[in-house]
Amino acid sequence: MDQKPEHDLRIDHPPTTLRELAVDRLRDSIISGHFVGGDRLVERTLCDQLGVSRSVVREAIRYLEAEGLVEILPRSGPVVAGLDWPRARQIYDIRRLLESEAAADCAKVADDAVKHRLRAALSDLEAAFGDADARKLYAATTTFYETIFLAAGHEIAWEIVQRLNSRISRLRALTLATTDRRISGPSHMARICGAICANDAEGAAEAVRDHLRDAAEIARDLLEDRS
């Protein structure tokens, strides 16, 4: 039998499932603070609010549990995970180690193509800051750091950061609500970009550390006030 001619079966834009939509909506609601730590996630209520079946809601909750945004408590069921300073401090410590090393190594090898991608991500990030568009800001920030990590050859470290991404975004939403963070955030990111584009490894690492130090101080003040 003759071989059938090859044709492209690739799906460029995979369809979004109901579970993915439910996860996105619930994740956004937790990150934005609509649901806060300790809030119960009642399946029947969520089914009505999202317009999906109970099985879809259960899948979404399991997914968000893996991201660290939901906890399953005995006799209470699923609740929004608490956000406190001891846990936030660990996230900032991990970020400081991974991101400063990635920025330094990226600066050592950054060529014109990497610099172009990084400047484009910074431009998108600054536009999102100006528009106060949280979704665009998180997407631009992810692209900015992804460019740094992958150019540096830190693929495994980037996988670790991605696993923390939902909790990082939750802290980012918390600190961005303050005036100080809205002023200092873009300048910190511009400084990181500038150091990498100048191939200044130590300057890039220091810029990351300063950025995360300031963000951590704001988060600590806010979370300790809450407690």
Image (cartoon, rainbow, N blue to C red):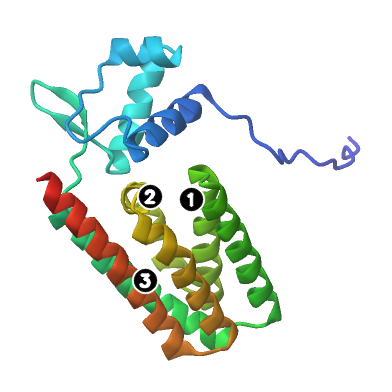
Residue kind at label 3, given as amino acid type: His
Residue 209 position in % (x across, y down):
33, 76
Residue kind at label 2, given as amino acid type: Ser
Quadrant for the C terminus in the image: top left
Whichever of callouts 2 and 1 sits on the residue coming sooner in the sequence is 1
**Image: 169 above or below 31:** below
User: Does dot 1 land on a helix, a strand or a loop?
Assistant: helix
Labelled pair 1, 3 in contact (Cβ < 8 Å): no
Residue kind at label 1, given as amino acid type: Tyr
Whichever of callouts 1 and 3 sits on the residue coming sooner in the sequence is 1
Residue 29 position in % (x across, y down):
37, 32
> Residue 69 occupies which quadrant of the picture?
top left
Nearer to us in this view, 13 or 169: 169
Give the mark toward the camera: 1 or 3. Answer: 3
Whichever of callouts 3 and 2 sits on the residue coming sooner in the sequence is 2
Residue 163 position in % (x across, y down):
36, 52
Which residue is located at x 76 percent, y 38 percent? 9
Q: Which residue is mark 3?
A: 211
Quadrant for the N terminus in the image: top right
Labelled pair 3, 2 in contact (Cβ < 8 Å): no
Q: Is residue 45 left or right of residue 1?
A: left
User: Does dot 3 land on a helix, a strand or a loop?
Assistant: helix
Which residue is located at x 20 percent, y 52 percent? 222
What is the crowding at mark 2: few (fewer than 14 residues within 10 Å), some, or many (at least 20)? Answer: many
Q: Which residue is mark 1?
A: 138
> Residue 216 occupies which quadrant of the picture?
bottom left
**Image: 199 above or below 53:** below
Q: Which residue is mark 2?
A: 169
Residue 87 position in % (x across, y down):
17, 54
Report the Cα–Cα distance between label 3 and label 2.
15 Å
